[in-house]
Each structure stands twice: as structure tokens, then as C-alpha cells.
Image (cartoon, rainbow, N blue to C red):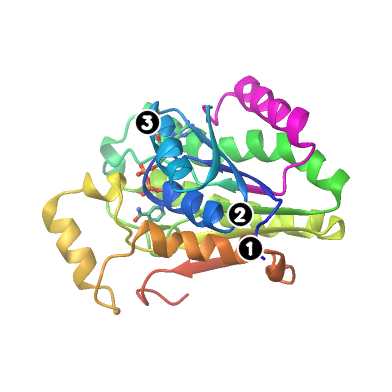
Amino acid sequence: MKKLEGQIAIVTGGARGIGAGICKAFCDEGAAVFLWDVLDSGQETAELLSNDGGNVFFQRVDVTDSKAVSDAVSEIISTHKKIDILINNAGIIRDRSFLKMTPDEWNQVMNVNVNSLYVTTKSVLPYMKEAGYGRIISASSVNAFQGAFGQTNYAASKAAIVGFTRALSQEVGKYNITVNAVAPGFVKSEMTDSMPEEVIKANIASIPVGRIGTPEDMGHVYLFLASKEAGFVSGITLHANGGSLTV
Ligand SMILES: NC(=O)c1ccc[n+]([C@@H]2O[C@H](COP(=O)([O-])OP(=O)(O)OC[C@H]3O[C@@H](n4cnc5c(N)ncnc54)[C@H](O)[C@@H]3O)[C@@H](O)[C@H]2O)c1
């Protein structure tokens, strides 16, 4: 039997990169996956996964838009009656040294990376509580722990996710809901492809396992935390960085 057979999952930011890797891993293990993204290319990603046998549906949802989120959740509940897994993966960078950082650059990152967790989790959690089961996993980052030049906004947002995870896990454990975070290291995606060549090279050179991470690597990590077997793991941040950092 597949690990997520019969389960319903939402993956935010699933159109590309790590999110698409998570969607693929969940599809392969039999989940029905609702791929949320602001990019229309989410439709193509969903089609590719469907052609590969996946049970996946694209919903154009901006995770900062509470109405869009609650409408999408209602649509899922009206047909499937439950949501087992919520993956808060959508995230953005707006890098600039702090002295030059604009209010917009600060606020956009906080909005998408942190405030969205209030919106998505608030909308899904009551259904998990009612069902007495749930897995909530959010994307932190290695840079929440080690910082990075030009990323005060991003590092602060990803550290906030660690605190959110620890606190919520204490509130909802009694409903058989686990809450965890993943802190990826340097992983190949459009986000990291957009960085300067020398930054990419330096980052890869510092990874003990000697290579960049892949969305497939991350899919496996999220799959473990999303599985029923991980029911005794809650409140943690799982570091997946090729050995780059120990905290
Ligand atoms: N790639 C890395 O090395 C790395 C490292 C640490 C953490 N992370 C985190 O992992 C997550 C995925 O990163 P990635 O590298 O795949 O990035 P990416 O930019 O390739 O993909 C992010 C996805 O999120 C979507 N998104 C952005 N804003 C959204 C919104 N308001 N509503 C819905 N969707 C939205 C984007 O359209 C995109 O499809 C992010 O939270 C990122 O911060 C990535």
C-alpha cells in the first residue's frame, strides 16, 4: 500500500522548484494533491504530474489572500470532506542589504513567508481538528539559523516559522495533528538559479555532501514528515542541507 493512499494534501507554491518536488513525491505515494500557486504554470506542472499517473489539481491561490484561501479550502472540503496534509511551501526572496531595504521589500517577504501561515493554517486547521488527524509542515531555511548577507527580511521570516511551528505543535498535538518545519539548505530551483553565479558556486562548494540539493531530495523529506509513520515527530525543524550546518 502506498504511504499516502486516500489522503488529501495541499501544497502551496507547488508550480515549480521544491513545491513541485513535494507534489511529485506525494502523487507517487497515492495522495490527491491540490497544487496552489499564483503562477499559471501550476496548471502545466499539474498536467505533467497527471500524465505520470498523479491525482493532482491546480488551484490558482495567492496564500496571502484570505478569501482565495478559504474558497479553495471550501471547494476541497465539499468534494473530499477532509484535508490531511497542509504544506506551507510558498515563499519569496527580496534580497537587499538592510540599510538599503525598502519597506515594500520587508513587508512583501513577511506577508508571503509568515502572514500566509496564519491565513492557510487558520483555514485548514478546524477540519483537521474535526477529523482528529493532520500534518502541517512549513518551509523554514538554513538561513533562519546562519543568516545571509542581504537577507535580514528573509532570515527573520524563516526564523518566525520555527517559532510558529513549536508553539502550534503544543496546541494541537492532542488532536493527533503534528506540526513541523523543514529547513532546506541550498536546493536547485528558480529561486536559487536567480542568484549571482559566484554566490551559487560558493554555496555549493561549502556543502559537505558535495552537491546542490534537488526538489526530489526535498520531496522525500516532506514525505517522511507527512506520513502516518511520523506521528511521534512534532514541533521540530528538520534540517536538510547536505551537512552544511549543525545547530
Ligand atoms: N531553494 C532553496 O535553496 C531554498 C532553501 C531554503 C528554503 N527554501 C524555501 O523553500 C520554499 C520553496 O523554495 P523554491 O526554491 O522552490 O522557490 P521558488 O521560487 O522556485 O518557488 C516558490 C513558489 O512559491 C510560489 N509563490 C510565491 N508567492 C506566492 C503566493 N503569494 N501564493 C502562492 N504561491 C506563491 C511561487 O510562484 C513559486 O512557484 C520557499 O519557502 C523557500 O523560501 C528554499
| Residues at circles 2 and 1 in contact by the CB criterion of under 8 Å | yes
Magenta stretch prevailing secondary structure = helix
Q: Nearer the viewer, residue 200 or 72?
A: 72
Q: Earlier in the sequence, mark 1 or mark 3?
A: 1
Q: Which residue is mark 2?
A: 30
2 or 3: tag closer to the N-terminus: 2
Q: Which residue is mark 1?
A: 2
Q: Is residue 184 visible in the rendered structure shown here? A: no
Residue type at the position of mark 1: Lys
- Asked which quadrant contains residue 213, the reply is bottom left
Q: Is residue 85 left or right of residue 45?
A: right
Residue 41 is tagged as 3
Q: Which residue is drawn at the image coordinates 24% and 73% (left, top)? A: 206
The image shows residue 22 at horizontal and vertical percentages of 49, 53
Amino acid identity at mark 3: Ser
Does the magenta portion include 74?
A: yes
The quadrant in which residue 99 appears is: top left
Tell me the SS state at disc 1. Answer: loop
Amino acid at the residue labelled 2:
Gly
Give how far across and how far down residue 59 sits, in percent. Answer: 54, 28
Magenta highlight range: 62-86
